[in-house]
Each structure stands twice: as structure tokens, then as C-alpha cells.
Amino acid sequence: MNMQLLDKDLTKFEWQEIENLLKRQNKNITDDLEQMWYLIDLVWDDLGCNNKKLDWRKIKAFYSHPVWLLNGLFIEQHEISMAHRHAISNWIFENKFRKVIDYGGGFGTLARLIAKKDIRIDVYIYEPYPSKFAIKKIKEYPNITFINELSSDYDCLICIDVLEHVPYPLEVFKQMIESVKIDGYLVISNCFYPVIKCHLPCTFHLRYTFNTFAKMMGLEVIGLLEGSPATIFKKITDKQIDMLKVKRFEKLSRIFFPIIETLKPILRPIKRLISK
């Protein structure tokens, strides 16, 4: 994994930390994205984190680690990752939204793309662990602001690869929905798979049921945002979300998840046979 770092305005400390991480690359991994995942997992293990027994002191240190600065720089040099973010920012621009929030968009890449395309869009980044580098990078964009509290009048909320990192994703999703005004939109991309160790196994059942919960929580599923892995949802009701009902169905989702996973090898050939 070759990284261009000379023009990134890094401090001496940031430069040294990234250089140290790059020296720990696995020479047997040839795919750059998988190499990045490998380095993230190394730091997870270095800090003694466990994705089944969550120690929030260690996890906070993990999400504050320079490996996330490296990950942000990697994304901005990774063609596929940037193509996804351009697709999302173009959709935001085309829909003429005026107040947009990037939930968990700490490095600010997507926010900066949106801000460049239309200075009239107020872009907010909700991020509990913003790096000094990310804060520095948005200074040239007067229409971008880091925040740590949500309001309730966003035209559109974007959430890219966040919910698989939190132990109670549907409760966080509820907060997201409540922050968007009626007839507003949510653009959500999830990865409920064990790609990296900080993807929590307790969220994996949602790979099959997330859209069902979205409907249950007052959203219409519009469909995939072309050119990206994100799904577009529209908020169609301001009715209070019944979290007791949601939690009951969440228990069922958890129960059926291992059953579905066990049956998948059997069901796949049957599905192919039927579709012929």
C-alpha cells in the first residue's frame, strides 16, 4: 500500500505515527483495501479491544488512534471509495438540500465534497472523535461545522459505515431519524459483516432485516443510490417510534440470524434453480 503523504499537511507526530503503521504492513497481502483493514485490526489488538466484551476506555483509545487518520487518507486515494462518495455528494447537490448532516463522518471527506459542490449547503459533521487533522482541513470551508449534538431539522442525513460499530444500532438509528424533518431523507450504508474486528457481531443480524426496521420506524425505502452501496430512505411520518415493538422484533431478528446463516448454503442452489 503506497500512500502519498508529502502534500497532506501532516504534523511531525502524525507523519511518524503513519510511517510506523505503514512499516507494519503484511507483505503477504497484495490488495490495498485488505491491507488497510489489516492495520486497523492490528491497532485493535494492540489496544486489547474485544468485540464481544466491550471495554469503552480501550475502544475510545482505538477510535482516537492515528490509524483512522491513515484510513481517511487512504480513502481519499482509493478510487472505488471516492467514486462512492462522489455519487452521494452529487445526489445531495442535485436534490438542492440546504441542511445536511454527515453522521460519524469524522475525517470530513464527504462533507468537503458536498461543500465544494454548493457553498449554499450547510454541512454538519456529527463526530465524537474528530481528529485535529480533520478539524484543520475544514477551516477553508465556511459551510462545514463539527457538532456533538443533533438538531431536528435536517433535510438529509448521511451515515456511511457507522452502525456496525455501535452495540445498539437501532437506538442510534432512531436518533438519526428523529433529527431529519418530515419528507427529509436518510442515506445509509452499512457493513454488517466481520470485515474488521471493530464491526460488532451483535449487529450482524441486521444485514437481513435493516430495511424492515427502517419501514417499522417510519421510513420509506427508496432504493440504492446509484454508484454507491448506500440506500436512500425517506421519512414519511412524524409519528413517535414504538421502540418496544422495535426491540421485540430485534430479538426475533437475533434468533433467526444464525438459522438463516446455517441454511444459506442449502437455499442458494434452490434459489438459482427457481430463477432459471
Image (tube, rainbow, N blue to C red):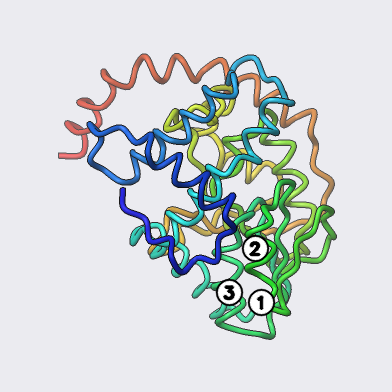
Where on the picture, by quarter, is residue 123? Answer: bottom right
Where on the picture, by quarter, is residue 276? Answer: top left
Q: Is residue 222 left or right of residue 2?
A: right
Residue at numbered disc 3: 114
Tally the marks. 3
Place of residue 117 in the rendered image (x, y in percent of width and height, measured from the top left)? 55, 82
Q: Is residue 147 left or right of residue 21?
A: right
Question: Separation of disc 1 and disc 3 at Cα?
Answer: 10 Å
Place of residue 3 in the rendered image (x, y in percent of width and height, measured from the top left)? 37, 55
> Callout 2: 10 Å neighbours few (<14), some, many (20+)?
many
Secondary structure under the numbered disc 3 in the rendered image: helix
Nearer to us: label 2 or label 3: 3
Per the rendering, the mark at residue 185 is 2
Q: Which of the two labelled residues, at mark 1 and mark 3, occupies the earlier sequence position?
A: 1
**Of the pair 211 and 122, the residue shown nearer to us:** 122
Name which residue type carries label 1: Phe
Q: Which of the two labelled residues, at mark 2 and mark 3, occupies the earlier sequence position?
A: 3
Residue pictured at 84% horizontal, 46% vertical = 240
Q: Are marks 1 and 2 in contact (CB under 8 Å)?
A: yes
Per the rendering, the mark at residue 97 is 1
Nearer to us: label 1 or label 3: 3
Name which residue type carries label 3: Ile
Secondary structure under the numbered disc 2 in the rendered image: strand
Question: Separation of disc 1 and disc 2 at Cα?
Answer: 10 Å
Question: Separation of disc 2 and disc 3 at Cα?
Answer: 16 Å
